[in-house]
Amino acid sequence: MHKAGKLKFSDVAGSKRIPDYESIPTMVEAGGPPCREVGGRVAMMASGVTPVAIVSRVNDDMAKVQQVPVIGEPLTSFGFETLNVKPAEIVKMME
């Protein structure tokens, strides 16, 4: 909608512009205050009794899916960074 001129963004809340939306300034470039990075995480979860082999296989498959252009490119074009975080790392993040 932005590229079609039907929606106008004032700025992006981040330290750098979004690659496919270079015309949209950062908050600081637009005259706003310095801002902290805005982010979030999305993770798949499974029951604690799920066999490690299945968790590993799903994790590996998800890493491959992120590389498929029809999946990964829309995410990265709007500023998302896709990461393949191992299950043990996610557990540590949640502790």
Image (cartoon, rainbow, N blue to C red):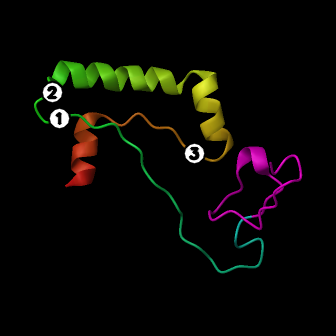
Residue stretch rendered in magenta on the structure: 1-25
Label 1 sits on a secondary structure element that is: loop
The residue under label 3 is which amino acid type?
Phe
Q: Which mark is residue 50?
A: 2
The residue under label 2 is which amino acid type?
Thr
Residue 37 sits in quarter: bottom right
User: What residue sits 46% from the left and 20% below the top?
Assistant: 64
Q: Are marks 3 and 1 in contact (CB under 8 Å)?
A: no
Label 3 sits on a secondary structure element that is: loop
- In this picture, residue 14 sits left or right of residue 83: right
Q: Are marks 1 and 2 in contact (CB under 8 Å)?
A: yes
The residue under label 1 is which amino acid type?
Ser
Q: Is residue 58 above or below residue 92?
A: above
Give the residue pinned by disc 3. 80
Q: Which mark is residue 47?
A: 1
Residue 49 sits in quarter: top left
Marks 3 and 1 sit apart, C-alpha to C-alpha, by 27 Å
Badge 1 crowding class, 10 Å Cα cut-off, few under 14, some 14 to 19, many 20 or more, is few
Q: Quadrant of the C terminus?
A: bottom left
Please tell me whether mark 3 or mark 1 is closer to you in this view: 1
Residue 77 sits in quarter: top right
- In this picture, residue 40 sits left or right of residue 7: left
Magenta-colored stretch includes residue 22: yes
Marks 1 and 2 sit apart, C-alpha to C-alpha, by 5 Å
Label 2 sits on a secondary structure element that is: loop
